[in-house]
Image (cartoon, rainbow, N blue to C red):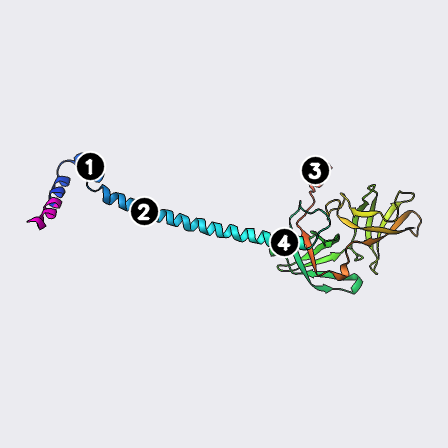
């Protein structure tokens, strides 16, 4: 008889639940859920919560792993950057370290091929530097590689100034790799040992990046201006790794001036 007690209870509860109108049935069901069935329902709810927490933990672990990888990548980048022993301020700019993997052209007129390209977000005219000073600019970009035009190439031109008194001139080189600061007004205050840096007029480099020092002065052939022979800080013949700055000059003024034409 005792074995049949649970069965009789279930039959009684079934009859109780199915008797009466809809509202009465709902009221009875709610009552049973809050009393007799509460432990079971509570257990099911708890299991669902545990599964939910488990899934959330898996997501958080995945996010943490991604963040950890990002931090490790930044730490490696910072360590590489420190090892380069940069002698000037570049903290305001994003950058990427690249390896020079080949050269193209004759020795004094050669370009550098680097192992980063469009997929690494490198663009034409991005400035290139070493730990000592400017190196050149990006002139061609493919998916995985880029070409750097160095400052001592005869095709390279850059607006520069003296660091001491902001005297403006043009950095250029001949086919033999001799680098000068040209178009200096006759009688200008410039002396041997003056440091030359990039100017704000440059469309390639930010202002103030080191270029070299003045080691001689002479008049131009047409005697209309002076030239300063420059000893560059960066030795392009011994570079195997350089830095590409993710820098583009703000040229909003161009569109505004065009509108006012």
Q: Earlier in the sequence, mark 3 or mark 1?
A: 1
How far separated are the C-alphas under marks 2 and 4?
46 Å
- Residue 79 — which label? 4
Q: Mark 2 Cα within 10 Å, few/some/many (few <14, many 20+)?
A: few
Q: Which residue is mark 2?
A: 48
How far separated are the C-alphas under marks 4 and 1?
67 Å
- Nearer to us of marks 3 and 1 is 1
Magenta region includes residue 55? no
Q: Which residue is mark 3?
A: 256
**Front-most of residues 134 and 221:** 134
Q: Which residues are magenta?
A: 1-10
> Whole-percent x and y of residue 85?
70, 53
Q: What kind of element bears circle 3?
A: helix
Q: Is residue 22 above or below residue 177?
A: above
Q: What kind of element bears circle 1?
A: helix
- In the rendered structure, the answer to whether residue 229 lies left or right of residue 18 reads right
Q: Are marks 3 and 2 in contact (CB under 8 Å)?
A: no
Q: Which residue is mark 1?
A: 31
């Amino acid at each position: 008889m005792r074995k049949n007690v649970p069965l009789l209870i279930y039959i009684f509860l079934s009859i109780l639940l199915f008797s009466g109108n809809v509202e009465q049935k709902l009221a009875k069901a709610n009552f049973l859920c809050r009393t007799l069935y509460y432990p079971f329902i509570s257990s099911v709810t708890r299991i669902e919560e545990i599964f939910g927490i488990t899934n959330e933990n898996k997501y958080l672990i995945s996010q943490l792993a991604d963040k950890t990888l990002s931090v490790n990548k930044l730490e490696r980048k910072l360590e590489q950057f420190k090892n380069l022993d940069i002698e000037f301020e570049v903290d305001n700019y994003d950058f990427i370290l690249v390896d020079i993997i080949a050269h193209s052209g004759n020795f004094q007129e050669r370009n550098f091929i680097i192992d980063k390209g469009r997929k690494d977000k490198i663009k034409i005219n991005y400035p290139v530097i070493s730990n000592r000073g400017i190196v050149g600019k990006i002139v061609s970009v493919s998916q995985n590689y880029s070409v750097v035009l160095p400052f001592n190439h005869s095709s390279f031109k850059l607006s520069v100034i003296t660091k001491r008194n902001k005297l403006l001139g043009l950095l250029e080189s001949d086919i033999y790799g001799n680098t000068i600061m040209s178009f200096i007004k006759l009688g200008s205050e410039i002396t041997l040992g003056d440091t030359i840096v990039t100017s704000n007029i440059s469309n390639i480099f930010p202002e103030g990046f080191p270029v070299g020092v003045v080691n001689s002065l002479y008049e131009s052939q047409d005697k209309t201006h002076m030239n300063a022979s420059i000893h560059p800080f960066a030795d392009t013949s011994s570079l195997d790794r350089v830095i590409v700055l993710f820098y583009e000059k703000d040229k909003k003024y161009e569109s505004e001036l065009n509108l006012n034409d």
